[in-house]
Amino acid sequence: MAAPYAAYVIDARTGEVLHSANAETRLHPASLTKMMTLYIAFEAVQNGEISLDDRVTISRKAAAEPPSKLGLKSGQRIALRYLIRAAAVRSANDAATAIGEAISGSEAAFAARMNRTAKMMGMTQTTFKNAHGLTQSGHLSTARDMTILGRHVLYDYPQYYNLFSRRTADAGIRKVSHTNRRLLSSYAGADGIKTGYTNAAGFNLVASAERGGKRVIATVFGGKSTASRNAKVAELLDLGFRRSPNRAPVQKPNRPAYVGNTATPGPAGKTIRVVSAVQKSPRPQMRADQEPVLMAIAAAAAAAQDEAIIKAAISEGLDVAMGSVDESVPDRRPAARPENLVLAFAEPAVAATEPDPPQLNAPQHEAQQEIVTRVSTSGGQHWGINVGRYGSRYQAERVLLRTALAEMTTLEGTLRKVVQSPRGFDANFMGMSRDTADLACRRLQARNVSCFMIGPS
């Protein structure tokens, strides 16, 4: 029995529907599913959850996935970038499962994140149950929803979009060929996006092509063969180019809010209590008679650094205004605060504490610190924004101050926080409502400032 047919064609620039046939019927998406797996991988990389060079350990479940596959072995370690290439180009099921497990810990948790993201994109008829798209009860989507997803892949992460037009790719353990290479080679302007096939789904394809300033996305479900599917998609792309206007403003889709692996927001009205913390410290516990002295030193150092950062930011602003910044000159850095001394800022008092001394022969871990320069206690303000990751705390603090001065309308009253991790120093503004965080990000992005929202945790 042939799989049901469905088709959907849009002008990618505006999202205008140019053709629709059975496009709202829930069908098996097959490997079109991997567009969402890859979308979340791109999101996770951009937001520092994982890096392209992180080595992923392959589970027995991932290694046992049926073809199409890369041929990964249980216990093998491979860089994320190779898994992404294999999933995008070869449509490898083992690579897709490994990506989901690396990001969310399990395929079930990753599927939940896929569904949250789909809902925020407006994919109202889609339910994901796995990362690869192999037939599973309840794992369904529509031609319309998959077209929406393809448009988000194109516009939300253009830096990765070239993956979908590569005829071949190095996947670490071997070279792989593109499952859509026939259409890419035969249709002028075609540059992606994703094929899919199972017995239940038939031959599926979401294709995008650009000609003469126009861009069209066409989706087909239920093709009878690769050749007939490609012929139908070519026909639909031609139809799209005929029906779309010569000129149209590019109206990019709204990127879904970043929520990471958090399933649900925290309760409203929670007071944000900001305290810096050190997990391990090689220093012995201070004596009681030393505490007032160290507190005074720490307070003086903090004041000196804040003053130096302000002066440096003002100086840099003047340099930019006069066109005299020399990028080759290293950062003007103030003196560092006393080593291993972490301050807890609270109103009205300032206190300095150190944890218990480490046990002998216990492994020492690098301290992870959070340094904040403002406190917010407004109930329900659990959202924030990130304005970049930097190589030093000083750079992150400088960017926070500079950004706060530039965007006082939405950032007034927020908490400036630098969060240290093994990957660097994140510059965050916290203590915001979701609407305020969204508005702040959009205003900063309009100034070409990198920004993404941080949800409640």
Image (cartoon, rainbow, N blue to C red):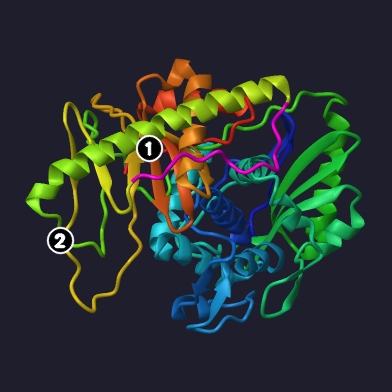
Q: Is residue 258 left or right of residue 319?
A: left
Residue at image position (71%, 20%) is: 322
Q: CA distance from mark 2 to mark 1?
A: 25 Å
Say which quarter of the image contains residue 315. top right
Q: x, y (%) of residue 17?
A: 71, 31
Instruction: Name the quadrant of the C terminus.
Output: top left
Q: Secondary structure at mark 1?
A: strand
Query: Label 1: which residue?
Result: 417
Residue range in magenta is 324-337
Residue 296 can be seen, yes or no: yes
Please, is residue 307 above or below residue 342 in the view? above
Q: Is residue 383 magenta?
A: no
Q: Amino acid at mark 1?
A: Lys
Instruction: Name the quadrant of the N terminus.
Output: bottom right
Q: Earlier in the sequence, mark 2 or mark 1?
A: 2
Q: Does the magenta stretch mainly form a helix, a strand or a loop?
A: loop
Q: Secondary structure at mark 2?
A: loop
Residue at image position (58%, 32%) is: 254
Residue at image position (82%, 29%) is: 244
Q: x, y (%) of residue 332?
A: 55, 38
Residue at image position (17%, 26%) is: 348
Q: Is residue 456 left or right of residue 2?
A: left
Q: Which of 65/356 is in front?
A: 356
Q: x, y (%) of residue 144?
A: 62, 41
Q: Amino acid at mark 2?
A: Asp
Query: Label 2: which residue?
Result: 356
Please, is residue 363 above or below residue 40 in the view? below
